[in-house]
Image (cartoon, rainbow, N blue to C red):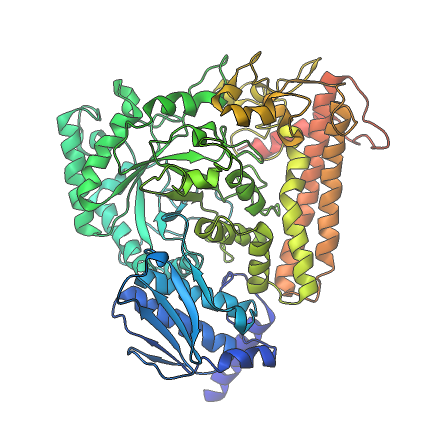
Amino acid sequence: MIRLFCLFSFLIIGFCASADDGYRLWLKYDLIKNTSVRTQYQTFTQYITYTGTDAVSQTAAQELQTGLQGLLGKNIRLQNTASSAPSGISLVLNASPQVNLGKEGFSIALQNNRLVISSNTPSGLLYGAFALLRKIQTATPLSKIPETSTPRIQLRMLNHWDNTNGTIERGYAGASLWKWYELPENVDPRYRDYARANASVGINAVVVNNVNASARFMSREYLLKVKALADVFRPYGIKIFLSVNFAAPKILDKFKNSDPLEPAVRQWWVEKAKEIYGIIPDFGGFLVKANSEGEPGPQDFGRTHADGANMLAEAVAPFKGIVIWRAFVYKADPKGDRFKAAYEEFKPLDGAFLPNVVVQVKNGPIDFQPREPFSPLFGAMPKTPLAMEFQITQEYLGFSTNLVYLAPLFKECLNTDTYANGPGSTVAKVIDGSLHQYPISIIAGVANTGSDRNWCGHLMSQSNWYAFGRLAWDHQLSSSQIAEEWIRMTLIQEAGGVASIVSIMEVSHGVYVNFTTPLGLHHIMGQNIHFGPEPWLERSARPDWTSIYYHRADSIGLGFDRGVNGSNALSLYHPDAIKQWSNVDACPLPYLLWFHHVAWNKKLSTGRTLWEELCGRYYTGVESVGLMQTAWSTLKGDIDAEIFADVSGRLAAQQREALWWRDACVLYFQQYSKMPIPAPLAPPTRTLEEIKELVRMYQLK
């Protein structure tokens, strides 16, 4: 029996050593192979002491112990006591709060041959512990270990679009992590691993259910299930939030309506808040999608968004709860411009919301397109805290078959100047609260996680979860720095290999834009599931769900005129922001067709006509995917074989999809330009009708 057990253990260990399924994400605490690097850390890690008795402090100490023992290959003692002896690591809660650290910041310092992680709060100690582990994982020299860091944004949040039946809206990595029918009795160990990953990058809030919310989450039956998740998340400093259905009083308790000015409805929410906080004392608050895409809301009763948000805000205010009200609203108007919808509904309400209400705005004015200008709301609501909503899941960016690193997209938006208070009024300064002194600051990302063993479907998409967390903590980090950290922690340490993968990741977003929506094209994907190209889509349930609504292709040219002779959506921006986009000859090419209807034969700044430039970008996009494949192929033998093969296969699928997009779009738009594919580019070998049939095939039930 002992011999059999030993054989079984050997096989398991051998399998784990030879294959990596991606489950551990970036929290890989394998033994550091470089002896000299390992030795420099061993001197300072004889033991770990901590004084806190709370769950988060204990988690910090245990995570540090687990990580260091794996990285350094030695047993490290854990002591719940203060110590000033040398050769150890101390987790210290400051007796007198240090102003520069705030509520969650930390300091890592070398003191008399000891490493000291200090903070004003247990959560800060936890973030400091993970920061130290990150430095050791990436082989940071001992002299560069000291650091003081504080988060720039208060609530760094994931929004899960997970449904009660286990599906995920716009999810591409399997089923939901949350097993609602098994909770609260059966708590999957994976919930803790999920919390660990979030805490390691500073994420401190989670909305666990879809914004198209089921009212059942307001029932006691489901609140007890949510409590079980909250209990798992709490030791990792994570607060739980819930999306709510605005009509919950009517659905659950058969009220005649859900009018936010109706006293009985208001009292229902007051009592519901008391019930929730009685079950989950540190509950964060509500996320609300209202009067959007068929969801109920205050406008159903002639009320405003502020009326609805303030009703909920009053209910949770006694418990220091927050209401996050989404600005993703647009009414079906074939003669209008969806670009303007959120601004027109919310700008007049600036200053009308209670102090514990935050309006959550998508990064762009339409809907998470591969590239969008920033939403004009970010420069227009100085009296109302605005939260950023990014999409980490790749709804419009190739699902889980395409390698698209999103940090450059996030950074492009965050670094853009709104000019709201003059030059330097970046979107980042708006949402972190520093520009308008918002009392609450939030950044949210629509999660890309699921039940797939590697969490994100495409292993490289893990980097987007990681990058969102790191930028939520510090939006001044560069996308390349974040990429290099993730690569060294997840894939490879060798400098040449790291550089190769960084280069692939850094160009990947631009490559995807080129073969799908170059020059500012947008919303030309397949309807419903949003997969593949469908620029010919001219009928849908709503006019603003078609493609022709956006690209406006005709015999003259291409693009949506949003200037003074068109929808005048440009007027929603500050005059200095307008200048960069208003002149068709000076408009940056990535945004050209967002704001202008451009003639097919117009010469652009590149020296090529619009038609030539459009075709060139589509063809270059396809060629660039091939170059990404070639660069990845050079890593064979240097990274885990299972990961290498999986990413290689997905890159091959991406190449196929890129060709599909290119052929569909150049052949479709050629019908309007009446121009040949410019030499030396070879025309597609299939017809537009053949491609349309392929699109139809993917839309069949």
Q: Residue furthest bottom?
A: 2
Is 684 placed left or right of 282 in the picture? right
Name the residue at 30% across, 58% down.
234
Is 76 placed left or right of 412 in the picture? left
Residue 410 in the image: above or below residue 73: above
Q: Nearer the viewer, residue 253 or 194?
A: 194
Is 313 placed left or right of 450 in the picture? left
Q: Quadrant of the N terminus?
A: bottom left
Is there any visible trace of residue 244 in the rendered image?
yes
Residue 298 in the image: above or below residue 427: above
Kindly indicate the quadrant of the structure image that contains residue 494.
bottom right
Q: Residue furthest front?
A: 422
Numbered label tally: 0
| Residue 562 spot, x, y in % from top left | 56, 18
Is there any visible trace of residue 183 in the rendered image?
no
| Residue 176 spot, x, y in % from top left | 41, 49
| Residue 428 spot, x, y in % from top left | 47, 41
Kindly indicate the quadrant of the structure image that contains residue 678.
top right
| Residue 117 spot, x, y in % from top left | 39, 69
Is 247 placed left or right of 332 in the picture? left
